[in-house]
Amino acid sequence: MDPLSPEEIERYKRHILLPEIGGVGQQRLKAAKVLVIGAGGLGAPVLYYLAAAGVGTLGIIDDDIVSLSNLQRQVIHDTGTIGQHKTESARRSIARLNPHVRTIHFEERFSLVWAHDHLKSFDLVIDGSDNFDSRYAAADAAETAKVPLVTGAVGRFDGSVTVLKPYETGSEGMLLPGYRDLFPTPPPQGVVPSCAETGIIGALTGVIGTIMAMEAIKLITQTGEPLIGRLLLYDALASCFDTVRYKRRQENA
């Protein structure tokens, strides 16, 4: 692993002081290559906190442009970037925050075809997309490529996060669960309305996105217990968290 420069040691001093992270953990963050799907409500805090944490390479894939209605929750963008591609707007924000972070951006929608060509270049995938096609494609592609996946979702006032490594075996000798063990099939088209139709509280995406970033940091630094086989649920109106445990379905074992 590449050594940390004196400037990096000063920048990440609060990480390095933690015995669970230390200099080795910070070097792991520097060496990591993380793909973030979506530079929107969830992608914004994920990208900001991973950049601040010193993740060496951040890939960003999104085919959308910044609009005024995004700014209520997509805090990596600002009024001056309206009309720009979200990937470019996010890249510039990250560069201002931490010049040590390299960004690679793709102005297109995530798909299995794209994943086949590019996913092998990354150590970890974080799915902050807002549609079921991308979520299932991300889960299937990450499982095939044997890359860990942190995936999250938000509704009007609630959200969820889990971590997937379905290509590994757990302590019981069985393969760990995948996304389709939790959600076997996508809901029918139009059954789950989008936030453009129902609304969403902006700060909620910050809560869920920050948890996703924390799970990514844990995976990279090999610290703590990631949310593997556990779905973390957050109810913003009741200010409560719940955890649902899930396992691999028998037919997928």
Image (spheres, rainbow, N blue to C red):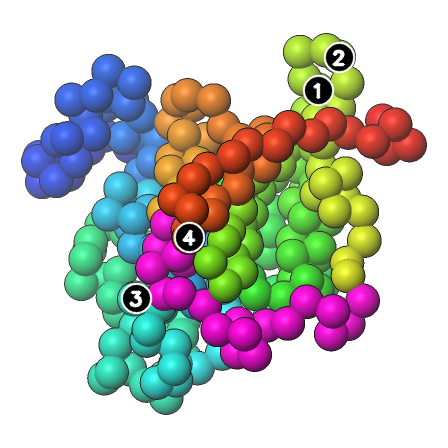
Instruction: Kindly state the secondary structure of the residue where label 1 is placed.
Output: loop
Relative placement, left or right, of 61 versus 246 is: left
Which residue, given by chain and number where applicable, does mark 2 sit on? 173
**Which residue is painted at 38% across and 77% down in the image?**
70
Q: Tell me whether the residue at label 2 lies in contact with that at label 1, contact meaning CB atoms closer than 8 angstroms.
A: yes
- The disc, 4 or 3, on the residue closer to the chain's N-terminal end is 3
Callout 3 crowding tier (Cα within 10 Å): few <14, some 14–19, many ≥20: many
Is-magenta flag for residue 100?
no
What's the residue type where badge 4 is placed? Answer: Leu
> Could you tell me residue 245's position as x and y percent?
64, 28
Instruction: Kindly state the secondary structure of the residue where label 4 is placed.
Output: loop
Is-magenta flag for residue 196?
yes
Instruction: Kindly state the secondary structure of the residue where label 2 is placed.
Output: loop
- The disc, 3 or 1, on the residue closer to the chain's N-terminal end is 3
Relative placement, left or right, of 243 versus 5 is: right
> Could you tell me residue 147's position as x and y percent?
60, 39
Range of residues picked out in magenta? 188-209
**Which residue is painted at 38% across and 82% down in the image?**
69
Which residue, given by chain and number where applicable, does mark 3 sit on? 76
Q: Quadrant for the N terminus, please.
A: top left
